[in-house]
Image: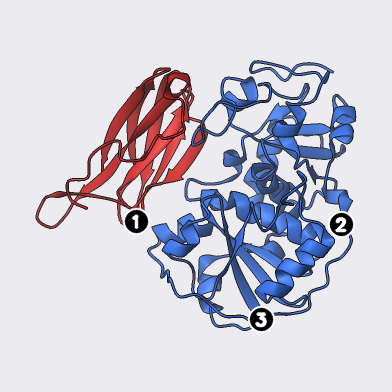
Chain colours: A red, B blue
Amino acid sequence: MCGATAGGLSLEGVDVAKESVIQGIVTRANADGASEPVGNAYVRLLDRTGEFTAEVPTSVTGHFRFFAAPGTWTLRTMAPKAGVVDSQVTARKGTVAEVAVAI
Amino acid sequence: MSRDTTLVSADWVEQHLDDPKVVLVEVDEDTTAYEKGHLKGAIKFDWNTDLQDQVRRDAVNREQFAALLSERGVANDDIVVLYGGNNNWFAAYAYWYFKLYGHEDVKLLDGGRKRWELDSRELTQALPTRDATTYTAQEQDTSIRAFRDEVVEAIGVKNLIDVRSPDEYAGRLLAPAHLPQEQAQRAGHIPTAGNVPWSKAANDDGTFRSDDELRKLYTEAGVDWDKETIAYCRIGERSSHTWFVLHELLGDESTKNYDGSWTEYGSLIGVPIVLGDDAGTA
């Protein structure tokens, strides 16, 4: 799984021009200090007021994706044996915002 | 109903993994989650193919529900413990079905699959075997199920609680944000409905907040406890979570789940809709 790239989940069948996509990958450093994807994390999407909007478990490759609306969002990442990590992201219609989360 | 009879902790479930009278059932929105690993001995329900009629848009009927439980080896006197992903949304939806068809003893695992995983508790890919049973389902208990005409008549009369996210309530999103947004129905909410996102009833790890916190939450959102209450969301699964809170944890027996929810209401011809963050008027 080392070296998994961003944007790994298929967008086949989705009209990206009509969506404001936020996606990315959750990683953590292994014992050697190398970055490895985390396949059992949970990523929450919080709106501009901090209210929960959606949550997904990461894929085996550590990936996650949301279909948001244009605006500013917070990603809150939780995983076993890790602290909670918040990341800010801006979504725009017709684009894919990529976020790398290190826990 | 109360927390003591409807909710069990992960510790309780660990102590009952080998109890023959306890049947664990996993119900996820992501129907592949079970195959990646599940609680020891747990069987799986697919919310879409097992709990929905595959021709009409409706819940499975009494005969279909009885056939499902018989085939999966669930008996009428079993203690059924439901759990799942998405903070138990679909497990709560299945719980509501078990109550709809009169199952005596059914419980939710507090925190669902997420709390279990965050605790690093054991998951297995081993598939259990259960002998078939002859399950008898009761007539639908429609005191916990709201239909569209009742919802339209409830505007300005009963408590309507829209449990979707604030952006879905206001019409800025049409679906939960992990799903594509292009949808057939109109955006917005039912006039006079308050917005209490289901997530306010749960902690970040998916466990339910305390009874005192929950009662305060709905009271502050304008729920009149002397009136009947109808909860809705997009397809009826998040509102099952809120129905569970109001009916099962707080004991408000007037609460109904509108399982047609926004995908039905937002497609109706001629009904009133409010856009924006205000509840609107009748």
Question: Residue beneath label 2, please?
Answer: B140
Q: Nearer the viewer, mark 2 or mark 1?
A: 2
Q: Is residue B183 above or below residue A59?
A: above
Report which quarter residue B192 is drawn in.
Answer: top right
Instruction: Report in which chain the residue with disc 1 lies.
Output: A
Camera-nearest residue between B245 and A97: A97
Same subunit, labels 2 and 1: the answer reads no
Question: Are there few (<14), some (14-19), or many (20+) residues within 10 Å of tag 1?
Answer: some
Residue B181 % position (x, y): 54, 27
Tell me: A79 left or right of B104.
left
The amino acid type, in three-letter code, at marker 2 is: Gln
Instruction: Report in which chain the residue with disc 2 lies.
Output: B
Residue B126 % position (x, y): 45, 75
Question: Residue beneath label 1, please?
Answer: A80
Secondary structure beneath label 1 = loop
Report which quarter residue B224 is drawn in.
Answer: top right
Tell me: A101 left or right of A21.
left
Question: Residue beneath label 3, please?
Answer: B21
Report which quarter residue A24 is drawn in.
Answer: top left
User: Mark 2 to mark 3: distance in Å?
Assistant: 25 Å
The N terminus of chain B, quarter of image? bottom right
User: Mark 2 to mark 1: distance in Å?
Assistant: 41 Å
Residue sitting at 79 percent across and 25 percent down? B268
User: In this orientation, does residue B225 appear?
Assistant: no
User: Mark 1 to mark 3: distance in Å?
Assistant: 31 Å
